[in-house]
Image (tube, grey):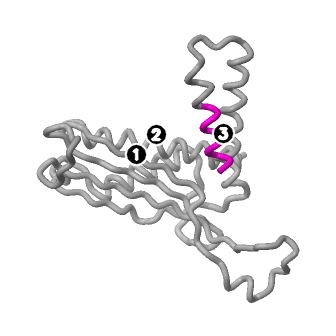
Amino acid sequence: MRRLLIFALFLSVAAFAQEPDGKLKALIEETQALADANESASFAGAPNVVLREPIVVIDDLVELGLNKDRLRTQIELILRRNGIPLVSSLSNAGWLVTTTIASSPSHFSAPNAPPGQYMYAITVSYHEYVLPIRRLEEPITSDVLRRVIGVTLWEKHENGYAEQGAVVKKIQTTYEEILNQFALAYLRANPRN
């Protein structure tokens, strides 16, 4: 809820600011700083990251060079380049899930879809196992430990349309942008030396 309020404040201030004066510019910067801090708060003390096998649903795009192995390699490279600690075991690690759905115009029908355009949808989400403690004074017992649940702590989506010759590049660029946002939020809360 707090994230939504900060975002709404940021949008309303930005919408009315044609040429921000000093006070308005400071307010916009302060609001952005609050939004950044709030997004990073989920990652405070975060463990290492396990990259789960990408979920890929692609119709006719394999011929265009888009496949699960190529996406996984690109995703791993972006994360490693940004200093995200990737490990193979879920022991003391959160997990990153990437989902790509892409389809040629012959496989979907959407009333507002541009003719001849490929549709794509991308989701990147970060999850961890947590203990749901309802009261801070509740002792951590073996019963409490049995209530460990997996939760989504961070998630971004993007979807759109692109021409046949541009859809693979658009998907790759979108992953680059989303994973850079993830890395920035993660590393802001967990700086590497």
The image shows residue 54, relative to residue 173, as above or below, that is below
Q: Amino acid at mark 1?
A: Glu
Queried whether the magenta region covers residue 3, the answer comes back as yes
Q: Secondary structure at mark 2?
A: helix
Q: Are the two marked residues, 1 and 3, in contact with CB atoms closer than 8 angstroms?
A: no
Say which residue appears at 70% left-offset and 73% top-offset. 132
Q: Are marks 1 and 2 in contact (CB under 8 Å)?
A: yes
Packing grade of label 1 (10 A; few <14, some 14-19, many >=20) is: some
Query: In the drawing, does residue 140 fall left or right of residue 151?
Result: right
**Disc number at residue 6?**
3
Q: Secondary structure at mark 1?
A: strand
Q: Nearer the viewer, residue 76 or 115?
A: 115
Question: Residue placed farthest to the bottom in the image?
Answer: 143
Q: Nearer the viewer, mark 1 or mark 3?
A: 3
Circle 1 or circle 2, nearest the eye? 1
Q: Residue at x 50, y 57 (%)?
A: 125
> Of residues 86 and 118, which is closer to you in this image?
118
From mark 1 to mark 2, how far is it between C-alphas?
Answer: 10 Å
Separation (CA) of disc 1 from disc 3: 21 Å
| Relative image position of residue 60 (x, y in whole percent) | 16, 54
- 138 to the left or right of 184: right
Q: Which residues are magenta?
A: 1-10
Point out which mark residue 158 bears.
1
Task: Answer above or below: position of 14 versus 175.
Answer: above
Question: Which residue, given by chain and number where applicable, does mark 2 sit on?
Answer: 177
Q: Which amino acid, by three-letter code, is at mark 3?
A: Ile
Q: Position of residue 164 (x, y in %)?
A: 17, 40
Q: Position of residue 179 (x, y in %)?
A: 49, 46
- Going from the N terminus, do you reach mark 3 or mark 2 first? 3
